[in-house]
Image (tube, rainbow, N blue to C red):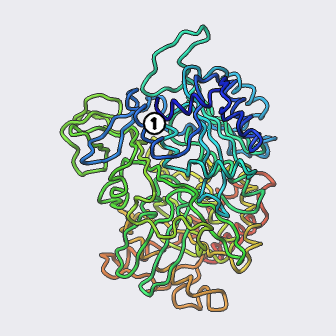
Amino acid sequence: MTILEARAAAHAPDASDDDDEFDRTPDRAPGLHAWVEQIAALTEPDRVVWCDGSDRERHELTKVLLDEGKLIRLNGEYRPGSYLARSDPDDVARVESRTFICSASREDAGPTNNWVDPAEMKTELTARLRGAMRGRTLYVVPFSMGPVGGRLSKLGVQLTDSAYVVLSMHIMTRVGAAPRALIESGEPWVKALHSVGCPLVDEAGVRHPDVEWPCNPDKYIAHFPHEREIWSFGSGYGGNALLGKKSFALRIASVIARDEGWLAEHMLLIKLTSPAGRRFHLAAAFPSACGKTNLAMLRSTLPGWSVETLGDDIAWLRQGEDGRLWAINPEAGFFGVAPGTGESTNPNAMQTIWGNTIFTNAALTDDGDVWWEGMTAQPPAHLVDWTGADWTPGLGRPAAHPNARFTVPAAQCPSIADDWEAHDGVPLDAIIFGGRRASNVPLVLEARDWNHGVFLGATIASEQTAAAEGAVGELRRDPFAMLPFCGYNMADYWAHWVSVGRRLGPQAPKIFQVNWFRKGSDGRYLWPGFGDNVRVLAWIAARLEAGNAETGRGAGDASAADGPLGVVPAPGALDVSGLDLAESDLAELFAVDPAAWLAEAELTEEFFAGFGERVPSELHAELAELRARLTRADGGRP
């Protein structure tokens, strides 16, 4: 009998043994154990397994998945301890149209979220979940987001019938006895219920064969912010199923953060070190396809400057006893997009996935390794694609799915910082916002104050780049890069940011905006990007060292000049030595067209209008100030 079988036998819902977990410790965590019993009675699994996060458990779960054909073992010479999974073609990404915020009222969810009445959604999902785990195992996964017991950390328990999800949660969170002990001691925790919605035994008791990737055509990812619960049905993929990630760490955590006075953000975290040894901790928010992972794992091209990784996707920010804002990366792993990741674009990511990695929907090479578009300049002569079909160059279809993923422990990243798991986080020096803009937005600017920074975050947008995405040049709004992830009304979220800044006062981090994607009239990128982005970070560090307003924030400081959009580098302040960058290109990187910006201000006003009277007055004031500055820059013309 394996450890999983033994544990399942001990914890089966109908077990009568005196050592049964339900009977032995119900007084220590009655809410947890009663909930597990309730869900087991509803979903009718064959067995219940309480996960301990051990290496042995991980090994046995892997063996189960290999035996069932749900994982492919990769060549241990190239990728030791690594595996490939292939999903159902109907289950390849987050499904935002089936993601719901079930707050008490539609207004609480706001116009950017899909809202359903919570009672109605629970009735619907209860019916869907009845018997949904027949023939399967119900895994109980206690986990911590952030270091176990940390001041900024939170606890959760995911119930799932997917061993693939359990293995992934082992990587992405801290699973095991320590989080469970805290829950059983009375610490608050989030309930996360997940089922692939594909029972192996039908209502008549007839058993059916399993498939490589079980899922259901009907999918729901429902969030109940008031109850701190997540119910997910039908999908086994990514953020739909790994409920510690977007669902807990952003949608539910953003509501907890609002209620408790902190911030749960879709931000990377890095540590920047200057040649003098001065360290700066920076958080940055970027919408998709804007270079977020590349910045999180940046390799500096400036001598003496280094960038270390603290987190690549999510940051929780809370005011400390010293009055400053402190930050943690609540995750323990990376769930990265594989296509486009290669030695030339992100060598640190490539070195991170040397082993102990779960790849999903990548292509398989003839010698048992993985491959995806952008991994190498030339594709192999033959592959097995993400669907399991033979593939050769020239077929006209990608070998890997465009959303193929790697799930890997963060500790394996060669650029990981020594304080990435600091128990109480790191002090935050600056916050950066960025989007993909071919025009209008300068390479870098500094917000004049916190409220101006909130305005910059609220108005993040990227320009559409192809007709398939919409009209070329049309702005795709993604405030704070949180549009799909904020668990409540976005306008209330902006107001919460304003209130956090009010509490922080002069201790608040400075806020900046960057744009690596500005193009010239000939369509080429003006800025080299990648490792040279450290040059922008170095200017940000200089601004941080310049200190507060008394030392000259703006035109009075040699490193900066005041512009209509914000504070920008003074001539010569941005280190471009060694770059083949024409003076005309550098000027264009910071050029501001007042007429174009006044037109964009009209679009911003329309965007704000969609949120009605809930938009904080501070943002309306910032918009008015922007218009006034642009009008003056345009020679006073209205």
Question: Which residue is at the front of the view, 206 or 593?
Answer: 206
Tell me where residue 497 sits by quadrant.
bottom right
* Quadrant holding the C terminus: bottom right
Q: Left or right: 255 with respect to 276?
A: right
Q: Residues within 10 Å of mark 1 (few under 14, many from 20)?
A: some
Residue in view at x 58 percent, y 73 percent: 430
The percent position of residue 448, horizontal first and vertical second, equals 65, 77
Q: Is residue 526 visible?
A: no
Type of residue at label 1?
Answer: Leu
SS class, disc 1: helix
Q: Nearer the viewer, residue 428 or 562?
A: 428
Q: Nearer the viewer, residue 401 or 449?
A: 401
Q: At which x and y percent is residue 225?
A: 74, 45
Q: Give the labeled residue for mark 1.
A: 61
Task: Identify the image quadrant of residue 136.
Answer: top right
Query: In this view of the protein, can residue 397 be seen by the observer?
Result: yes
Q: Is residue 417 above or below residue 148?
A: below
- Residue at image location 58% in from the left, 13% down from the top: 202
Rendering coords of residue 365 (x, y %): 24, 39
Q: Above or below — where is 551 with respect to 13?
A: below
Describe residue 313's horizontal placement relative to residue 550 as left or right. left
Residue drawn at x 50%, y 68% is 270
